[in-house]
Image (cartoon, rainbow, N blue to C red):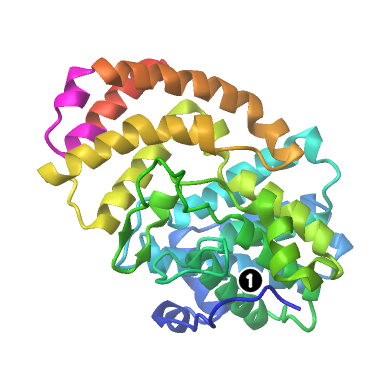
Amino acid sequence: MPLELPQPYDADSVERAVPAPAQARALLQRELPGLSTRLSERHQRWGGEAQSPERIRAIEDAVLLGLARLGVRHGRWGQDFHAYHNEAHVMDLLIMRIDRLHAHPAAASLELEDWLRLELFASCHDLRQREGGGGAGPLGANEAASIAETRRILGVCGLAAELEPELHLALDLMIAGSTFDARPAPARAVEETDRLGPNSAELAAGGGALAPRLVPWLREAQPDLLNQAGARKGLRLARIAADLDTANVGEVFGRLCDSAVQLCEEREMRAGRRLGSARSAAPCREFLLQAQLRYIEDLHRFASEEGEATFGSDKALNLLRMRGLTGRLQTDGAFRQAQTGSEVIEAFFDASLQIDGTG
């Protein structure tokens, strides 16, 4: 039994343009040469001989297909560029963050299959970013659509649900758990949306990950799913995956600031405001001044022991740095007097370098 979705979320033009692993591998050989070899070598280091070569190849196909589609749909290889939700975000999770987690003793109990599923999550969790309407309950529409496309990706790569029910269930739960709660606290403004649906860059500053709340929601909405084989492991991986997705809080401070600016740029694009216009100055200032501190201080919570052990100490340092940056920006003349979004971002970067100690 899969997670119930509110609608089918059919294939779009990008799926039709990159329908199968062959097209994805050809694209990535041109755009990210060496990635396929890097994944294969990593799987061997992880003990890939414990599974059949055919299944490992199928997993790699699915990872590469998801990455290629996001790069074409919202990345640098297509026509609808999103500054944050693009192939670079996938690569951050797929390579850097998974490698960092894998190296930490707290993750020693994870098995090869768990790591393969985390790779698939990295590649597929943000496939869709322009879905209108709502999801089911707290499940976001973008996440629901990404689940639907991920199921098709697994199928075309030889990992159909009837052959791999536990894999499908785990990915359903992991992607669902990456939803951020879009409902603000009563005292806060209603979330901003655009004409094509919820703005994922806005949601990143608007709530916490769903992963820790999956069980109570499913107990009410779809209790039989919790009794399925593999549900417990899928729920554990959902919590770890949510921590990987938000691990910018535990990266070097400059990368945290980079991701804040990327989200800001994407938010302005989705709202139809040019960064070079005066209209973008105030919302950029608010996002980079208040929303970032609120994100790391109030909204972000580690969902897994593995995630907290790996990224928690660096998050604590970044919280202090972000408080220092926020205090500096409060009185920074260039930031407060900037007339456009571009000028706000430039002043933010200048101030962050002083906090980071790299400027």
Residue type (three-letter) at the residue carrying disc 1 = Asp
Choose top left, top right, bottom left or bottom right for residue 160.
bottom right
Q: Is residue 16 magenta?
A: no
Disc 1 element: helix
Relative to residue 296, is residue 110 depicted above or below? Answer: below
Crowd around label 1: few <14 · some 14–19 · many ≥20 (10 Å): many
Choose top left, top right, bottom left or bottom right for residue 40.
bottom right
Residue 81 in the image, given as x and y percentages of width and height: 32, 60
Where's the C terminus, which quadrant? top left
| Main secondary structure found in the magenta portion | helix
Pointer 1 residue: 61
Residue 168 in the image, given as x and y percentages of width and height: 72, 72
Choose between 210 and 99: the one closer to the eye: 210
Residue at the spot x=64%, y=24% of the render?
313
Relative to residue 166, is residue 19 depicted above or below? Answer: below
Instruction: Point out the residue furthest to the front here.
Output: 186
Residue 310 left/right relative to 130: right
Q: Is there any visible trace of residue 276 in the rendered image?
A: no
Residue at the spot x=38%, y=50% of the render?
202
Residue 217 in the image, given as x and y percentages of width and height: 68, 60
